[in-house]
Amino acid sequence: MKNVSYKFKEIIHNGGPFYAYAKVVLADGQELEFDSENDFLIDGNGYSESGGVSSFPLGVAVAKAITLNLDNSDEKYSEYDFYYARITLYTEAELDNGTTERIKEGTFTVTSPVAIGDIIEIEAINDMYKANITYVPNVSLPTTLLQIAQDVCSQCGILLGSPSFTNQDFTVKTIKEGMTCREVLGYIAQIAGGNALCDENNRLLIRTYDLSVFEQRKIISGENLRKEVQDRISGENFGENISDTVQGGTFGENDNFHVLASFQQNPEIS
């Protein structure tokens, strides 16, 4: 959850406009600033969150990456080396009182050399890249998931932002040799029922999926229900005398989950 002003929320409600702004610290310490009016091209900018899977992620150490395309037609950035630059990216909006408000999206590192031309394309990734090193346990086994997570973060130079998480006391007896810290974080997140990620301040979080709403129901179904079925959630046809049900179009107090039905092609279930 990101804190913004009421005026900013109004702009969100109205659909914008929003702009990009970035502060850059080069590897040699030089500082630059990019904005939408003078630097970013209209196309080719964006960000993505990926754990190397295309389906519903579970047990994944998710990295957030950005792509920036800069207008360098006047060669104003030709003299700079962006390799290992640290880029702090913001979303900004102009408020009706004439001020500018910014939301921090994260700080990213350029981990590949950048080609210099009329258009400079920069790709950068958040601190999850630091976990792409081989994990060498500094804890005595057996130990808990929490202690392993603390050890991994210590080795990677990442701050653990989840002082506690689901199943943190789960005991691990052995760890396979040769795994990367990122793989270990993925396994920890899987046992916790979620994923690992870095927030906008590059603190590592173990985020668990909230399944409590489903635990309130005995059966969840996407099929046709007969009249005698009770205590179910479904996205299809209901009989008239069914009690304790939730229909696909009438959620009421249960609007914190969604029932999906009627697909053009069968969905991939993960």
Image (cartoon, rainbow, N blue to C red):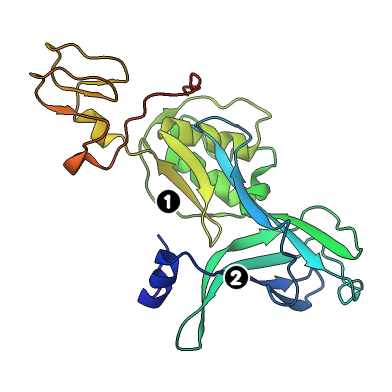
Badge 2 amino acid = Tyr
Nearer the observer, disc 2 or disc 1? 2
Q: Is residue 233 above or below residue 90?
A: above
Other residues around mark 2 within 10 Å, as few (<14) / some (14–19) / many (≥20): some
Label 2 element class: strand
Q: Is mark 1 on a helix, strand or loop?
A: loop
Q: Identify the residue under disc 2.
A: 19
Residue under label 1, please give it: 162
Report x, y in % for residue 34.
Answer: 71, 74
Q: Residue at x 28, y 42 (%)?
A: 256
Question: Going by the image, does 225 lie left or right of 113?
Answer: left
**Seen in the image, is 240 located left or right of residue 4?**
left
> Which residue is rendered at x = 56% and y = 40% of the image?
61
Instruction: Specify the quadrant that holds the N terminus.
Output: bottom left
Q: Residue 135 carries which label?
A: none
Position of residue 97 measured from the top left corner of the image (x, y, whole percent): 45, 88
Q: What's the distance in space between the residues labelled 2 and 1, CA to CA? A: 31 Å
Residue drawn at 60 percent across, 32 percent down = 53
